[in-house]
Image (cartoon, rainbow, N blue to C red):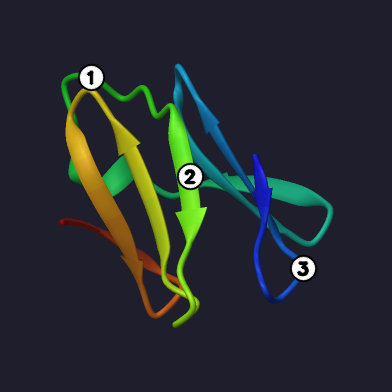
């Protein structure tokens, strides 16, 4: 789990990647339809881009919305 520069919590789990949206958490990786949805690592770079890694690979969040490979 990390807190980004906007104060939002990100949670990497065995069941997907989630981001805080108000009082709720929304799943960020759902659109990718990965066969292995586990995420084990999170990192926020100096540019504010959140990186998430797991068995399916390394992904980054583009403009706070879309999870993309690489």
Label 3 CA crowd tier, 10 Å (few <14, some 14–19, many 20+): few
Residue 50 placement: quadrant: bottom left
- Position of 2 relative to 6 (above/below): above
Q: Nearer the viewer, mark 3 or mark 1?
A: 3
Q: Does residue 69 show up?
A: yes
- Position of 53 relative to 61 (above/below): above
Please tell me which residue is depicted at 65% across the width and 65% down the height of the picture.
Answer: 4
User: With 47 as the anchor, is 30 left or right in this view?
Assistant: left
Per the image, label 2 sits on a secondary structure element best described as: strand
The mark found on residue 42 in the picture is 2
Q: Earlier in the sequence, mark 3 or mark 1?
A: 3
Label 1 CA crowd tier, 10 Å (few <14, some 14–19, many 20+): few
In the picture of the structure, the residue carrying the numbered disc 3 is 7
Q: How many labels, in total?
A: 3
In the picture of the structure, the residue carrying the numbered disc 1 is 36
Q: Are marks 3 and 1 in contact (CB under 8 Å)?
A: no
């Amino acid at each position: 789990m990390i807190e980004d520069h906007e104060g939002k919590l990100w949670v990497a789990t065995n069941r997907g990647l989630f981001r805080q949206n108000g009082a709720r958490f929304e799943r960020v990786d759902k659109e990718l339809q990965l066969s292995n949805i586990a995420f084990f690592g999170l990192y926020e770079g100096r540019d504010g881009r959140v990186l998430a890694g797991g068995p399916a690979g390394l992904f980054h969040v583009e403009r706070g919305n879309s999870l993309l490979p690489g």
